[in-house]
Image: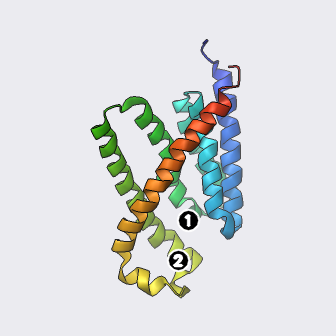
Amino acid sequence: MKKSSKSYQIALSAIACAAAAGALTLGSYVDVLLGACYVIAVFALMVPLAKDFVWGDALCYLATILLTALFCGFSFLYLVPFAVFFGLHPIVNYLQRRYIKPKPLFFICEIVKAVWFDLAMWLSFRLVFVPVFGLEAAAWYPFVEKYFFLVLFVGGTVFFAVYDAVVFYGQKCVDAVLRRLRK
């Protein structure tokens, strides 16, 4: 297989960046769609990784954050969860899948990623979800506030395990679709 040209790498990363920035912009304007738009943006960031363009994906991640901040009037609060976890997660999964082969080391990486996810969700909850979305008015908020760390670390870790498995599977699907492209 011949090596892809730089212009192909740039074009593929730019298309992924446009899709991710568009999804995040839509999600920041329509609060109900924010979670779904995060998932769309994560899958868009998987496109350069399917062709082994790690640097293209890293630059795509940075450009996505900058463009979305620009399109949203520098409303960074909507971007906090994506910037601290969801945007970097596909790159970390790619590197883990590519370079970590022994099962015990793979399991240690999963534990580190679960802690990273829990900390990102704690930051997002305190910085975004409560002040921006007004969750203190929700009926379940007193229970979550009382048992916050238990809910965060048990529920968050279980959610992360499912999410991480879905992202690994999603990367395989994106790889299979993009394998059909010639370059």
Residue 53, compared with residue 111, is above or below; it is above
Q: Given the image, on which type of amino acid does mark 1 rest?
A: Leu
Helix, strand or loop at disc 1? Answer: helix
Instruction: Give percent across and percent down for residue 1.
Output: 60, 12
Give the residue number, with chain letter if any, for mark 1: 77
- Residue at position x 31%, y 37% from top? 103
Instruction: Give percent across and percent down for residue 45.
Output: 60, 42
- Residue placed most toward the observer, 147 or 5: 147
Residue 36, compared with residue 56, is above or below; it is below
10 Å crowding of disc 1: few (<14), some (14-19), many (20+): some
Q: Quadrant of residue 75?
A: bottom right
Q: Is residue 2 left or right of residue 93?
A: right
Instruction: Give percent across and percent down for residue 121.
Output: 44, 64
Give the residue number, with chain letter if any, for mark 2: 131
Q: Is residue 31 left or right of residue 55?
A: right
Residue 74 in view (yes/no) = no
Helix, strand or loop at disc 2? Answer: helix
Instruction: Give percent across and percent down for residue 117.
Output: 42, 57
